[in-house]
Image: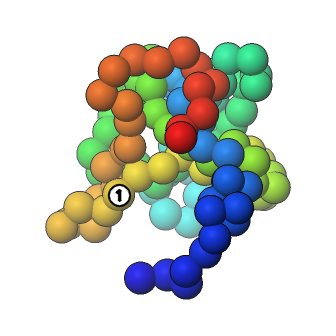
Amino acid sequence: MSDIISFEDFTKVDIRTGTIIEVNDFPKAKKPAYQLTIDFGKLGIKKSSAQITELYSKDDLLNKQITAVVNFKPKQIANFVSECLVLGIENNNNEVVLLKSTTKTINGTPVC
């Protein structure tokens, strides 16, 4: 388990739903990854690099609603700037399984 944090610490993490509107290969990434463009509704469009190529094809991801942390500082990854962190869980094979709502929500809806 990670360090214990307060509820106030948790509330600083802005986790929202968004829909992937574009998926591109990311050949310059150190590990296999996609470049994602995600629509977060009123928050706008953000880009993310995601190492999710084992379980998801580009077609699987297009128009898929995901959850992501949207208030991290942008991070330069090779020739790409990642503006949010798409959330997932590693399965028994160390493959990332995306976290998503069981029901479609409005893009930009905060996780509570």
Nearer the observer, 6 or 27? 6
Identified by mark 1, the residue type is Ile
Q: Is residue 98 left or right of residue 110?
A: left
- Residue 73 coordinates in the image, percent (x, y): 81, 55
- Is residue 36 visible to the viewer in this orientation of the structure? no
Q: Is residue 52 left or right of residue 42?
A: left
- Is residue 101 visible to the viewer in this orientation of the structure? yes
**Residue that appears at 63% across and 70% down:** 6
- Residue 82 coordinates in the image, percent (x, y): 71, 48
**Residue that appears at 80% across and 52% down:** 74
| Residue tagged 1 | 89
**Residue that appears at 31% across and 49% down:** 97
- Residue 37 coordinates in the image, percent (x, y): 63, 29
Q: Would you identify the image quadrant in which residue 70 lies? A: top right
**Residue that appears at 55% across and 80% down:** 4
Tell me how the rendering is colored.
rainbow
Against 98, is 64 above or below?
above
User: Is label 1 in a helix, a strand or a loop?
Assistant: strand
Alpha-carbon neighbours of circle 1 within 10 Å: few (<14), some, or many (≥20)?
Answer: few
- Residue 79 coordinates in the image, percent (x, y): 76, 51
